[in-house]
Image: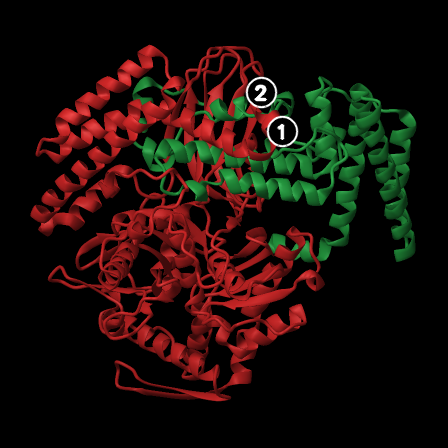
Chain colours: A green, B red
């Protein structure tokens, strides 16, 4: 598995797809064809307004949910803040409002859901804090990693491939979990105490690797029933 | 003046202005309508006291349409014109429907959604469903004594975008104002949750006539949050009937049957299945059209064995939903059974064995979805009366069942919104051009979990053109996906580097165009045109009065959001609407209203933003307003 494939499964940064140069099938449309097609427009795409206007004006994820900006975050407090914000903006609160108002409610509600998702995982929360403070992760271009870190990765993967019994597998999984937890506590220190966002961004890049590895392990564990899913 | 009183969005209206709202369960086999009356949510029966309306529509040569039991009785006599289980055809093409060769209809393959050729011409499944919905709307309006202000129509949680869109079109065609499309298991969870004052994590196992859903929900004080959902939108009680039908053919050494006999035998199979839910043995007796008699006996164990693979499919989907919710079976505090097919003892046994607990079925599994939908419709309509001693306010947070993405080079799917994302959700991703000087992109929107586009469902294709010529990879095309609270998708694309917002072309690959909907609406209005005109005029006049009052009051309270020019423009539109509202031409009034609505859209959006900011600021004013 290539390195970029590792990272692609980590976070979806907006620049990611562009940087990967994802091509799309192209075609050249004539004016007439365009006009003809626009007749069909309302049938499927009810709205083409770019969602930006409201969302770009909206506060950052922490402010939107009424939370203090910081890496340390009690999951229960996040859930509470999420439900509190959603109960004010959810489209169900505006079911008999005008179309324009419903649209605004939908955008706010989507922004609240987005904030919840971005803050829920420690990895994404750390990445978001780095970006807010001008230290973007840019995992696909910032590829330099300490060589001992890379070496450790390879050792773990090999150990797992060679692991004969349950116990050996569990040992590797525990080691990775331990390293993962250590990185998280590093991040808490770098972000909340030292405010070293560039340093934190480096740790986030490493965490992306470990996160990917943990998901691979989980996938391996559940491989049997997933095989059924793929064939069903 | 009651009509002109404008309630703030989401605020309650006075008790004398209670709005009539209904919840509709548009089922594969049966459909129901329910409403909250006297603080009690209940299913509304027909004139004969029957709550269930069989979802069967018969088109007669004289132009009449019969829905329900009368159509049901004719299904074996006139199978081609008597449409059964139309829900399985919603948003589907001919090649999408499993066992289509066993259906006795005259199919017409059309782009996107198939059509049926009947004695009344070619009908879309949307039109057939609209006939069912129309009967339910009329039943509700007669029972409640007035026009419905809005309705919630339920859909299987696992319905994809095409199926949801088709359902919403059908409701529109039936003259319903759709407050929300609500997932069936979520509606059931609401009914149970409020009834039992439940808290914890629940699984809703919903096996209906033609669809299977499993939803995992977290229920806490006033919040119903769906954590994950799964299912199969083509698996239900019908498939158990079909298995029994095939078994009967084998036993009787029969092969190809005429449509009448196919239908007759299917009806007998269903009756035998229903008997087996109460007894250990059942018989199937039928006189076929050739005069031969069929007489078979079947035991519950034989039936359970021949349908075990269907039950296994539901359990597999259930395990996957639990994995998606990152929960073990032991973390589930309660299991709720929904749908008539959960009456089969071997289905109940399987659910009990998987979860290690007795499932709840104390609310009628046929009615619970409609009841939950009615409770939610009542809330969304703005009626905040107390339902008995229960909480009178709650929040439902639902998810999309299937990932949404676009096709990238090589026929691969790039997921933009993963399944089980809480809705509404908006996500954007940037893409770029592939060739030097490329000025257009074909964008193909798909839904599904598979890596290859050909294995996913194609939702739409559109084209972004007018991109300025650049070297390959220099353009920044931002594709935005927005899924609203009904689970319906809208997609847009913008080229960003030059600030030029390029145009979009859309070719719907399924469903009905707006022109088709309008044509169908006109067709369905037809005879009663005169009444309709008078009613339309009155409606437009009332709407004009409402809009004028709302605009005047908005200008008074939030006029500071407009600059002088903007205000002038709105005042001009307001004067024009006032002048036209006195006239007698509904179309002219409507045009004025539309112009006013369009001209005040930006203003309405700004007011809404202000009010939401204020609402959010309730507890954390310093964060929000400082930005």
Mark 1 burial class by Cα count in 10 Å: few <14, some 14-19, many 20+? many
Q: Which residue is mark 2?
A: B627
Question: Image point 37% across, 57% down: which residue?
Answer: B23
The reply to whether the C-beta atoms of the residues labelled 1 and 2 are less than 8 Å apart is yes
Secondary structure of residue under mark 2: loop
Q: Which residue is mark 1?
A: A63
Report how far apart the C-alphas of labels 1 and 2 lie in the structure: 9 Å
Relative horizontal placement of residue A221, taking residue B129 as reference (left or right): right
Relative horizontal placement of residue B483, taking residue B625 as reference (left or right): left
Tell me: residue A102, above or below residue B521: above
Q: Quadrant of the N terminus of chain B?
A: top left
Chain bearing mark 2: B
Query: In this orientation, does residue A139 appear?
Result: no
Chain bearing mark 1: A
Q: Which one is in front, B245 or B88?
A: B88
Where residue B127 appears, x then y in whole percent? 26, 52
Where residue B77 appears, x then y in whole percent? 23, 74
């Amino acid at each position: 598995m290539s390195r970029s494939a590792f990272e692609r499964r980590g976070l979806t940064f907006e620049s990611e797809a562009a940087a990967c140069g994802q091509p799309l099938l192209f075609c050249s449309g004539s004016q007439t064809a365009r006009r003809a097609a626009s007749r069909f427009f309302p049938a499927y795409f009810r709205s083409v307004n770019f969602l930006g206007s409201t969302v770009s004006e909206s506060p950052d994820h922490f402010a939107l949910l009424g939370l203090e900006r910081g890496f340390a975050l009690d999951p229960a407090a996040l859930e509470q803040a999420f439900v509190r914000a959603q109960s004010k903006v959810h489209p169900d609160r505006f079911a008999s409002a005008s179309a324009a108002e419903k649209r605004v409610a939908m955008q706010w509600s989507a922004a609240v859901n987005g904030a919840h998702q971005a803050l829920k995982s420690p990895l994404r929360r750390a990445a978001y804090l780095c970006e807010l403070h001008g230290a973007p992760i840019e995992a696909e271009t910032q590829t330099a990693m300490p060589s001992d870190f890379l070496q450790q990765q390879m050792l773990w993967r090999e150990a797992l491939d060679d692991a004969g019994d349950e116990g050996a597998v569990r040992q590797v999984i525990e080691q990775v979990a331990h390293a993962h937890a250590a990185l998280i506590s590093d991040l808490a220190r770098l972000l909340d105490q030292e405010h070293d966002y560039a340093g934190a961004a480096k740790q986030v890049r490493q965490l992306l690797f470990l996160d990917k590895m943990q998901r691979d392990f989980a996938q391996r564990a559940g491989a049997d029933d997933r095989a059924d899913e793929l064939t069903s | 003046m009651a009509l002109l009183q404008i309630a703030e969005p989401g605020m309650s209206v006075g008790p004398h202005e209670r709005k009539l709202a209904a919840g509709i369960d548009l089922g594969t086999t049966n459909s129901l309508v329910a409403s909250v009356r006297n603080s009690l949510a209940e299913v509304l029966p027909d004139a004969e006291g029957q709550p269930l309306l069989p979802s069967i529509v018969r088109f007669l040569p004289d132009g009449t349409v019969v829905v329900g039991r009368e159509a049901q009785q004719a299904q074996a006599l006139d199978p081609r014109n008597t449409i059964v289980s139309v829900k399985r055809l919603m948003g589907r093409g001919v090649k999408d429907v499993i066992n289509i060769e066993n259906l006795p209809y005259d199919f017409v393959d059309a782009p996107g959604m198939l059509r049926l050729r009947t004695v009344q011409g070619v009908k879309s499944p949307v039109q057939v469903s609209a006939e069912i919905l129309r009967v339910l709307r009329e039943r509700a309006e007669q029972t409640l004594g007035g026009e419905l202000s809005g309705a919630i129509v339920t859909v299987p949680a696992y319905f994809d975008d095409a199926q949801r869109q088709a359902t919403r079109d059908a409701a529109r065609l039936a003259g319903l104002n759709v407050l929300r499309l609500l997932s069936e298991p979520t509606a059931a969870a609401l009914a149970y949750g409020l009834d039992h004052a439940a808290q914890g994590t629940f699984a809703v196992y919903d096996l209906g006539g033609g669809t299977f859903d499993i939803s995992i929900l977290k229920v806490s004080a006033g919040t119903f949050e769906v954590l994950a959902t799964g299912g199969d939108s083509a698996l239900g009680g019908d498939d158990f009937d079909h298995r029994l039908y095939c078994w009967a053919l084998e036993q009787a050494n029969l092969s190809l049957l005429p449509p009448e006999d196919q239908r007759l035998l299917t009806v007998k199979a269903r009756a035998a299945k229903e008997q087996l839910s109460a007894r250990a043995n059942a018989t199937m007796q039928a006189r076929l059209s050739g005069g031969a008699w069929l007489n078979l006996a079947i035991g519950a164990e034989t039936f359970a064995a021949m349908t075990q693979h269907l039950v296994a499919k539901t359990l597999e989907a259930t395990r996957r939903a639990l994995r998606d919710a990152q929960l073990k079976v032991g973390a589930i505090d309660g299991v709720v059974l929904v749908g008539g097919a959960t009456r089969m003892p071997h289905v109940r046994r399987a659910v009990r064995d998987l979860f290690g607990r007795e499932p709840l079925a104390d609310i009628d599994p046929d009615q619970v979805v409609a009841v939950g939908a009615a409770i939610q419709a009542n809330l969304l309509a703005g009626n905040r009366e107390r339902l008995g001693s229960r909480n009178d306010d709650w929040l439902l947070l639902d998810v999309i069942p299937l990932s949404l993405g676009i096709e990238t080079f090589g026929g691969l799917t790039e997921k933009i919104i993963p399944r089980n994302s809480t809705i509404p959700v908006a996500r954007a991703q940037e893409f770029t051009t592939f060739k030097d000087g490329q000025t257009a992109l074909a964008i193909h929107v798909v839904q599904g979990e598979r890596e290859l586009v050909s294995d996913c469902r194609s939702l739409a294709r559109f084209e972004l053109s007018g991109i300025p010529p650049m070297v390959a990879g220099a353009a920044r095309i931002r594709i935005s996906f927005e899924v609203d609270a009904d689970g319906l998708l809208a997609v847009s694309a913008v080229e960003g580097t030059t600030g030029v917002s390029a145009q979009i072309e859309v070719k719907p690959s399924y469903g009905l165009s707006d022109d088709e909907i309008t044509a169908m609406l006109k067709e369905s209005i037809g005879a009663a045109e005169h009444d309709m005109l008078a009613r339309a005029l009155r409606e437009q006049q009332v709407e004009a009065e409402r809009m004028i009052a709302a605009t005047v009051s908005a200008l008074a309270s939030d006029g500071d959001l407009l600059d002088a020019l903007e205000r002038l423009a709105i005042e001009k539109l307001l004067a024009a609407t006032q002048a036209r509202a006195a006239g007698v031409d509904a179309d002219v009034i409507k045009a004025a209203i539309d112009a006013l609505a369009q001209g005040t859209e930006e203003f309405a959006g700004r007011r809404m933003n202000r009010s939401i900011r204020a609402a959010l600021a309730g507890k954390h004013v310093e964060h929000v307003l400082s930005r």
